[in-house]
Amino acid sequence: MRIMIFSAIVLVVTAPAAAQQTLRDEDLSAIAEKVRQFAPRDQFDAPPPQQSLAGRRFSYTIEPKPIGRATNCEAFPEWVYLPAQGRLNFSWSSSLTLTYNLLGANGPVFPPTMTRPRNAELTFRSFTCVKRIEPSYTATNAFGAQFTIEKMTDVVSAIADFEPLGARLAPSSWEASVSGDAARTMVANARVRVSGTLADWWPGTSVVCGRKRLEPSIRLPLDRTTDLCLIRGRVERIEVIDQQTGAVLYSVEPSARR
């Protein structure tokens, strides 16, 4: 009898622990892609139900890309090296989007109650990046002047949440004084690790996917579409690590700014 009672207790205690395993890079990517791949037949075709992610921990580690809009996606970690100064900078800035600017195949992704000014702003940090450089084209303004417009599409998955009002910005970059081969080695081994806790946008929806577009202007002749899948979550720690040694080179807590 004692053995049977002990076994039952073990089952009750260990099952939740397995279910709450921290979600890694590949887990988050698979969750986002499953939603992205859904293509509605018409405006009456609802997406399949999603599993709640509320309370789940996540921690992904990604390799920063060289700085530049031709090489990197929006809100994806990047690096730049200044050889004359011997300075290597890593940055992980978030980006902002408005809920009513995120459009799916059948219109706005977020319901009207979430597109009012109070809840309109979202910040996101990308953890996947696929950049598509498309053929440029020529545009003409009202005065007949012609401009060459660059055209590109970023396909990204990201952790996102509503922007807290009056938040103080935490540091979003780290710089090291290093030169020559040492800088080259540091870039090869440096990774950005982002950790936090997930939530749901609303019951039954933990991921939303849609597109937003930056339309070209005279000052910025760039036509940029961002294909976004947003997993709601609160980023609690960002670290720059050396993947070869495991050393933490820099650490910051963005959520502490609140």
Image (cartoon, helix red, strand yellow):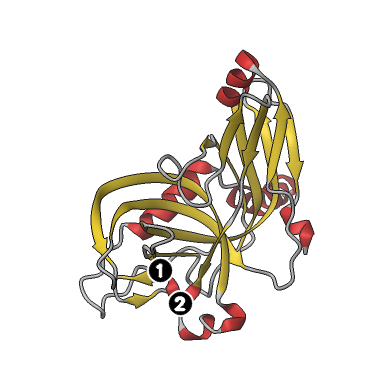
Observer-nearest of 35 and 81: 81
- Tell me if 113 is positioned left or right of 147 in this view: right
- Tell me if 172 is positioned left or right of 153 in this view: right
- Tell me if 212 is positioned left or right of 65 in this view: left
**Which badge, 1 or 2, comes first in the chain's sequence?**
1
Q: Residue at x 59, y 65 (%)?
A: 161
User: On the image, numbered disc 2 is attached to which residue?
Assistant: 100
Other residues around mark 1 within 10 Å, as few (<14) / some (14–19) / many (≥20)? few
User: On the image, numbered disc 1 is attached to which residue?
Assistant: 49
Q: Amino acid at mark 2?
A: Tyr
Residue at the far left: name it: 41
| SS at circle 2 | helix
| SS at circle 1 | loop
Residue 84 location, x and y as percent?
Answer: 64, 24
Q: Amino acid at mark 1?
A: Pro
Residue 43 location, x and y as percent?
Answer: 26, 79
Quadrant in the picture for the C terminus = bottom right
Above or below, comparing residue 177 to residue 51 in the picture: above
Residue 1 location, x and y as percent?
Answer: 72, 49
Q: Residue at x 63, y 21 (%)?
A: 183
Above or below, comparing residue 178 to residue 238 in the picture: above
